[in-house]
Image (tube, rainbow, N blue to C red):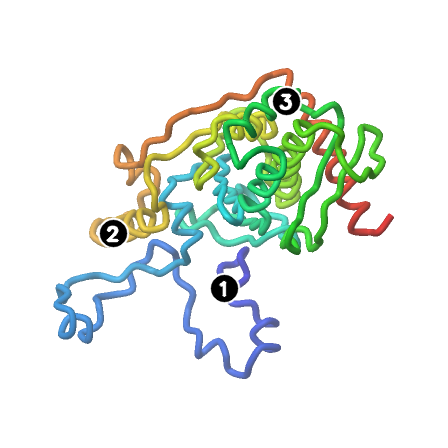
Amino acid sequence: MDISTKDWDPHCLHVTAPELKSKLGNITASHECLGPISSYFVERYGFNPDCQIITFTGDNPASLAGMCLQSGDLAISLGTSDTVFLWLDGHPTPSLDGSVFSNPIDPESYMALICFKNGSLTRERIRNHHTKQSWEDFNALLCCTPPGNHGYIGIYFDQQEITPKMQGTFRFDASGNPIDHFEESATEVRAIIEGQFLAKRVHAERLGFNIGPQCRVLATGGASNNKVILQVLSDVFRATVFTQDTANSSCLGSAYRAAHGLKIMQTENFISFNEFVGDCRPSFTPVCSPRPDASTVYDDMVLRYASLEHSILSGK
């Protein structure tokens, strides 16, 4: 699909298979009603024959809907893999940094997704090495180091990363010189957390995301329960971090989208998704706000991180 025209790309169709367009059918808007449910499901499972089917989507776009992202928002799932969801306005700049989709809840916008394979398991490895498997001790070490980590930067890819495609552990001093290890445990602890969040900001910005004054970061996943880690996230992105009280945003988003599509079909008038959801949207709790002194530090570190990552990839 050509995300600009919302239609099949003729060149891609041609090189994939003959007469593919007729087999795929037409692309429909994400809020469009496709018609009543199949009689098979009515007879086999007792569905109401008047049940309408709304255009399907995947679990990640459904999660964006479930979190009710708005223009300028960014969502981060901190789990075994860390996943970043972006709301992009205007024409996106697709690249190898992630995937760009049509926005599932706004036909004029786009959604980007970046998946980082080295998430919680890498954080836990560093925790276990420097503490007795204690997040409390890990947090104490993180808190006793300043934002910017005195210039030290760490890049930790225990497994081959997706974005970027590389593997290994790389440590750098304040001058950008590679070093074998950090002298202090606290330095390593801050390096893993700062490095992971700097990577997310670098690759989000390459896909066209702009951190504006109204930007919100919505955090989910296991590490979203750790306020000390979330403070670093808030500082790196210069945005307030919120957490959500709903566990399964994908299922919730699917339900929202079904109700939204049905409402449009019944009224024959388009209503925006966020207007439709209204007061039924999940509640978010602000947990961290960016510290002004830290934001300046991380603006500079983002540039340094991007340069170091490039040097590793290029072998220079």
Q: Which residue is mark 1?
A: 7
Q: Which residue is mark 2?
A: 268
First-in-chain label (1 vs 2): 1
- Identified by mark 2, the residue type is Glu
Q: What's the distance in space between the residues labelled 3 and 1, CA to CA?
A: 41 Å
- Identified by mark 1, the residue type is Asp
* Residue 36, image x, y percentages: 21, 66
101 vs 165, nearest the viewer: 165
Quadrant of residue 225 within the rendered picture: top left
* Residue 59, image x, y percentages: 41, 55
Q: Please name the residue shown 55% across and 41% down the image.
A: 124
- Give above or below for 314 relative to 153: below
Tag nearer the camera, 3 or 1: 3
First-in-chain label (3 vs 1): 1
* Residue 212, image x, y percentages: 56, 28
Q: Please name the residue shown 62% across and 45% down the image.
A: 207
Q: Return the mark for residue 295.
A: 3
10 Å crowding of disc 1: few (<14), some (14-19), many (20+) = few
- Identified by mark 3, the residue type is Ser
Q: Residue furthest front?
A: 132
Q: Please name the residue shown 43% across and 37% down the image.
A: 70
* Residue 13, image x, y percentages: 56, 74
Q: What's the distance in space between the residues labelled 1 and 2, CA to CA?
A: 23 Å
Q: Helix, strand or loop at disc 3?
A: helix
Q: Helix, strand or loop at disc 2?
A: loop
The answer to whether marks 1 and 2 mark residues whose Cβ atoms lie closer than 8 Å is no
Quadrant of residue 131 within the rendered picture: top right
- Give above or below for 94 relative to 246: below
Q: Residue furthest top?
A: 293
Tag nearer the camera, 1 or 2: 1
